[in-house]
Structure formats: structure tokens, C-alpha cells
Amino acid sequence: MFIQINPANGIAVYDQIARQVMFAVASGTLGPGDLVPSVRELARELAINPNTVARAYRELQHQEIVEQVPGTGLAVRSGARRTCQAERRGLLREQIGFALQESFESGLNFEEVATLVDAEMQRLRKSHRPTGEEA
């Protein structure tokens, strides 16, 4: 499975699971009708309490990302990708906001922050260039 847990990152384990499932749906890795691993299977794979996985799955059901399919398990709902993409953008916007706020609080001015952001964007463009594209 695609989920990795980091107990030291300050985000609750159930939330990490829910976020990673949502990111997989947002990216198209999981599509409508695809099943998520059973609670027991994922708990065993991640070596965590099954109640933690169940809590993550309840949250995903509440957000209408997955739905119970009788006799089968939990499957990604039709239309969930759009919801997940919006959630992913919101989480990323929040993280960027925190990083920018920290930059300004550490004494950097607008131009210094803009230079750092631009340099990082250039670095990422080079490392994520599609195959065959000129440098």
C-alpha cells in the first residue's frame, strides 16, 4: 500500500492515513470504485492499532470520499477526486502560509523570501522536467 506513517511529525496517525488516501484519490492513484485496504490489513501493514485505521476510514466516509460497498469493503466514491483535490490545495496553501510566516518572523524581508521561493521553484522545475524536455 502507499501509506507511510511518521509518528514524530505532529500529525495524528489517523489523520496521516486519511490525508494520504485523499492525496491518492486527488492524484488519480485511487479512482472511483477502487477499494481501500481493509482495516485489519492496513493496521497489520502499518503495525498500528486497528481502531486508528477505523477512525481514519470513518473520517473519509464522513467527508464522502469512500463509501461502504456491501460484502466488499470501502470503495472510493464517484466524484471524490474533485473533493480531494480541493482539500489537497487547502492543506498545501496552509503549509505554504506557515513557511512564509516563519520566514518573515525570522527577520527575512519580502524580497529575500521571494528570492528563496523563486530559487526553490527553479530547482523543482529542473528535477520534475518531463522526459525529453530541453533544459
Image: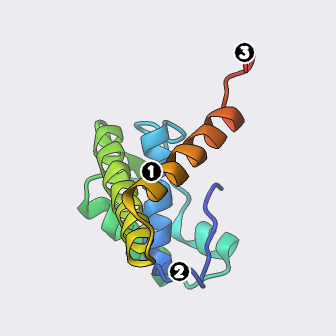
Residue 83: image location, x then y, percent: 28, 45
Q: Residue at x 35, y 43 (%)?
A: 85
Q: On the rendered structure, is 130 left or right of 37?
A: right
**Residue behind mark 3:** 134
Classify mark 3: residues with Cα within 10 Å, few (<14), some (14-19) or many (20+).
Answer: few
The residue under the point 45% across, 78% down is: 106
Name which residue type carries label 3.
Glu
Image vertical order of residue 53 relative to residue 1, above or below: below
Which mark is nearer the camera, 1 or 2?
A: 1
Task: Give the alpha-carbon distance from disc 3 to disc 2, as whole Å.
Answer: 48 Å
State how far apart marks 1 and 2 are (Cα).
44 Å
Q: Which quarter of the rendering shows the C terminus?
A: top right
Q: Identify which amino acid the numbered label 2 is placed on.
A: Pro
Task: Count numbered badges in the picture.
Answer: 3
Q: Which residue is mark 1?
A: 114
Residue 9, above or below 80: below
Query: Can you tell which quarter of the image residue 33 is in?
Result: top left
Mark pair 3, 1: CA separation: 26 Å
Disc number lying in front (3 or 2): 3
Question: What percent of the width, then of the height, locates residue 102?
Answer: 42, 74
Q: N-terminal of the two: label 3 or label 2?
A: 2
Label 3 SS? loop
Q: From this viewpoint, is residue 72 visible? A: no
**In terms of secondary structure, where does tag 2 sit?**
helix
Of the two numbered discs 3 and 1 on the same chain, state the one appearing first in sequence. Answer: 1
Residue 19 in view here: yes
Which residue is label 2 attached to?
A: 50
Residue that appears at 74% across and 20% down: 131
